[in-house]
């Protein structure tokens, strides 16, 4: 290689392809894919989108925010979910049962757990705890806590579109947490497919088919329980059993028709010989006018032409194991024991099914409400306290007494704490 000994001396150029080979070698070190591997995987195609496009939450349609109708991109609309939940008897019974269980749960306010796992004394947060209990006695200034939770549970199970409006007062402080109809809320997304940060519009309320109001994340809390990647809407238990619910409705309609639409028990009438087609049609209309939809008339005697014969068919099966199968599917979606809808169980089996339903179904739902209350408390500025469900108390008096005695003996609770839980006045120095 020539040396640069005097001005004007030229340095020999790099060999052709040296830079290209160096780049390929670097890519080989990084990816492990040799550029000349025989029938190899080859290098991946270079991205065609502008640099920095990757990292979107999902491949949303172009102009997603311009389509303002809620759930326009989902196979099932809100109206279908409401209709199914309101018209399928078994589905509605299961929903109301789960709502009853949640409404019957007691809630309490206590200091948040410290990093070491202990709870500070409640006396140090007495003022905040009192304010929180007073506020959440009527969270929306209209419904008490139990009714308010029941409203949220309806949204949770039917549409999974719980929407809470943080109504401000004149001082721009939170006046109440008002529950909106989640079927009117259409979430918006940013360029990355995620919920825009305040003060950008994160949600729109659609009324009478047009966008009526814009909300930021500071104004509206949209809190589905069952979120899925690639979807901005929740996936409710009703939507999960939509085919089963439809089957149940049609099954019930079939059973109802047996009592309302039939013109006699299932069978075939054989007309006298020589009856014409027109006469058969006329007689059929006359017969239906007497009995169709008129159950009492079916108990009356009826004169027919001489030679008429009746051949009964196989009676309809109004109940079969398929009904139990459908009931089990619905109950499983809500983690409810199917005991009331299936064949008899013995007591031990029924209690085991009940305990499993509570553990598998009610506890996760209560955890959902705990997370929700955590967010609401943070919005109120109560970061040191929390709303928690009170542990279920044993209903059997003997067992409850044994638990209380054991807790006092082990130092878990004091005598006065036990008395307070039973609604009794405290004893001195206990």
Image: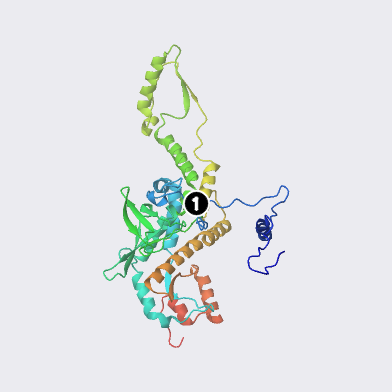
Picture coordinates of residue 5 (x, y %)? 68, 69
Seen from this angle, which residue lies furthest left?
A: 170
Is residue 170 or residue 7 the one in the foreground? 7
Residue at the spot of label 1: 59
Relative placement, left or right, of 157 versus 360 is left
Picture coordinates of residue 284 (x, y %)? 39, 22
Which residue lies at the image location 44% right of the left edge and 35% below the top edge? 258
Relative placement, left or right, of 217 versus 114 is left
Q: Can I make out residue 425 in this image?
A: no
Identify the image quadrant of the N terminus.
Answer: bottom right
Is residue 72 or residue 247 the one in the foreground? 72
* Badge 1 density bin: few <14, some 14–19, many ≥20, Cα 10 Å: few
Relative placement, left or right, of 408 versus 294 is right
Is residue 372 or residue 275 the one in the foreground? 372
Relative placement, left or right, of 228 versus 85 is right
Seen from this angle, which residue lies furthest bottom?
A: 429
Seen from this angle, which residue lies furthest top?
A: 274
Scheme of colours in the image: rainbow
Is residue 144 or residue 316 the one in the foreground? 144
Picture coordinates of residue 285 (x, y %)? 37, 23
Q: Is residue 369 above or below residue 43?
A: below
In which image quadrant can residue 286 be found?
top left
Circle 1 — which element? loop
Q: Is residue 327 above or below residue 264?
A: below
Which residue lies at the image location 42% right of the left edge and 68% below the top edge? 375
Which residue lies at the image location 40% right of the left edge and 58% below the top edge? 162
Picture coordinates of residue 101 (x, y %)? 45, 60
């Amino acid at each position: 290689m020539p040396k640069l000994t005097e001005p004007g001396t030229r340095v020999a150029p790099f060999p052709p392809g040296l830079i290209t080979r160096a780049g390929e070698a670097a890519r080989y070190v990084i990816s492990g894919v040799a550029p000349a591997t025989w029938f190899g995987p080859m290098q991946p195609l270079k991205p065609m989108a502008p640099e920095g496009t990757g990292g979107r939450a999902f491949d949303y349609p172009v102009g997603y925010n311009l389509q303002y109708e809620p759930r326009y991109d989902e196979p099932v609309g809100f109206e279908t979910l409401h209709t199914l939940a309101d018209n399928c008897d078994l589905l509605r019974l299961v929903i109301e049962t789960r709502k009853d269980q949640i409404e019957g749960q007691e809630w309490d306010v206590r200091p948040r757990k410290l990093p070491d796992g202990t709870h500070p004394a409640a006396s140090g947060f007495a003022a905040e705890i009192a304010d929180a209990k007073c506020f959440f006695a009527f969270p929306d200034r209209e419904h008490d806590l139990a009714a308010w939770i029941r409203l949220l549970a309806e949204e949770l199970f039917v549409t999974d579109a719980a929407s809470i409006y943080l109504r401000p007062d004149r001082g721009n402080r939170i006046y109440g947490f008002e529950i909106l109809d989640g079927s009117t809320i259409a979430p918006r997304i940013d360029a990355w497919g995620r919920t825009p940060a305040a003060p950008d519009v994160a949600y729109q309320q659609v009324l009478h088919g047009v966008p009526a109001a814009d909300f930021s994340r500071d104004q509206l809390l949209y809190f589905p329980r069952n979120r899925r990647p690639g979807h901005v809407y929740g996936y409710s238990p009703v939507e999960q059993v939509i085919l089963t619910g439809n089957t149940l409705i049609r099954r019930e309609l079939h059973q109802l028709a047996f009592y309302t639409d039939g013109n006699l028990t299932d069978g075939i009438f054989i007309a006298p010989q020589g009856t014409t087609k027109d006469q058969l049609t006329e007689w059929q209309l006359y017969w239906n006018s007497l009995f169709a939809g008129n159950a009492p008339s079916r108990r009356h005697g009826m004169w027919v032409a001489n030679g008429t014969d009746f051949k009964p068919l196989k009676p309809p099966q109004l109940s079969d194991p398929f009904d139990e199968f459908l009931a089990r599917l619905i109950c499983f979606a809500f983690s409810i024991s199917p005991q009331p809808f299936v064949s008899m169980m013995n007591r031990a089996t029924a209690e085991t099914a009940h305990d499993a339903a509570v553990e598998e179904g009610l506890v996760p739902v209560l955890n959902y409400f705990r997370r929700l209350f955590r967010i609401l408390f943070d919005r109120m500025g109560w970061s040191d306290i929390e709303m928690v469900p009170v542990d279920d108390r044993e209903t059997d008096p003997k067992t409850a007494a044994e638990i209380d005695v054991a807790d006092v003996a082990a130092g878990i609770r004091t005598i006065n704490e036990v008395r307070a839980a039973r609604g009794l006045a405290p004893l001195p120095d206990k």
